[in-house]
Amino acid sequence: MKSSIKEQSRFDARLPKEQKQLFEKAATLGGYRNLSDFVFQSAQEKAQEIIQQQELILASEKDAQLFFDAITHANKPKESLKKALKEYQQWSAKL
């Protein structure tokens, strides 16, 4: 039988009193149950944003490399592609 209890770990932090007061005010105004909920939710949202942005950059770099490789190492066109181009050129000349 699988247990639905998630394993937890502890996170402690020291911060200046003014910063804690700022966070507490934001948590209260934001409708969070407590300071911990506010801090963890905010940190999780920022972490997801950073990870998503980094993955997007990596995907873009990978796509750019694939595109560059396809252009620089392109195969010569097959006869069927040459025929299709010739047919398209004839068709578009009639327009």
Image (cartoon, helix red, strand yellow):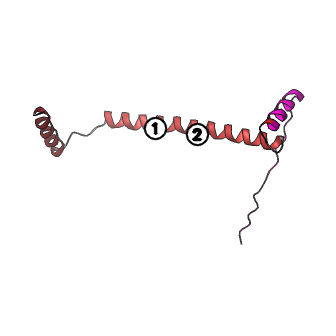
Residue designated by label 1: 62
Q: Residue at x 11, y 32 (%)?
A: 93
User: What is the three-letter code of the residue carrying label 2?
Assistant: Gln
Quarter placement of the N terminus: bottom right
Q: Nearer the viewer, residue 24 or 86?
A: 24
Q: Nearer the viewer, residue 4 or 92?
A: 92
User: In the picture shown, does residue 40 fall above or below 94?
Assistant: below
Quarter placement of the C terminus: top left
- Work out whether mark 2 precedes mark 1 in sequence or the reverse, and give the earlier one: 2
On screen, residue 94 versus residue 12, left or right, reads left
Circles 2 and 1 in contact, beta carbons < 8 Å: no
- In the rendered image, residue 78 lying in the magenta stretch gets the answer no
Q: Residue at x 25, y 40 (%)?
A: 75
Element at label 1: helix
Give the residue furthest to the right.
Answer: 17
User: What is the three-letter code of the residue carrying label 1?
Assistant: Lys
Element at label 2: helix
Q: Residue at x 80, y 35 (%)?
A: 29
User: Which quarter of the picture shows residue 6?
Assistant: bottom right
Q: In the image, which residues are magenta?
A: 1-28
**How crowded is the residue under tag 1: few (<14 C-alpha within 10 Å), some, or many (20+)?**
few
Residue designated by label 2: 52
Q: CA distance from mark 2 to mark 1?
A: 15 Å
- Disc 2 or disc 1, which is closer to the eye? 2
- In the rendered image, residue 20 lying in the magenta stretch gets the answer yes
Q: Position of residue 4 (x, y in %)?
A: 73, 64
On screen, residue 69 versus residue 9, left or right, reads left
Q: Position of residue 33 (x, y in %)?
A: 82, 45
Q: Residue at x 82, y 43 (%)?
A: 36
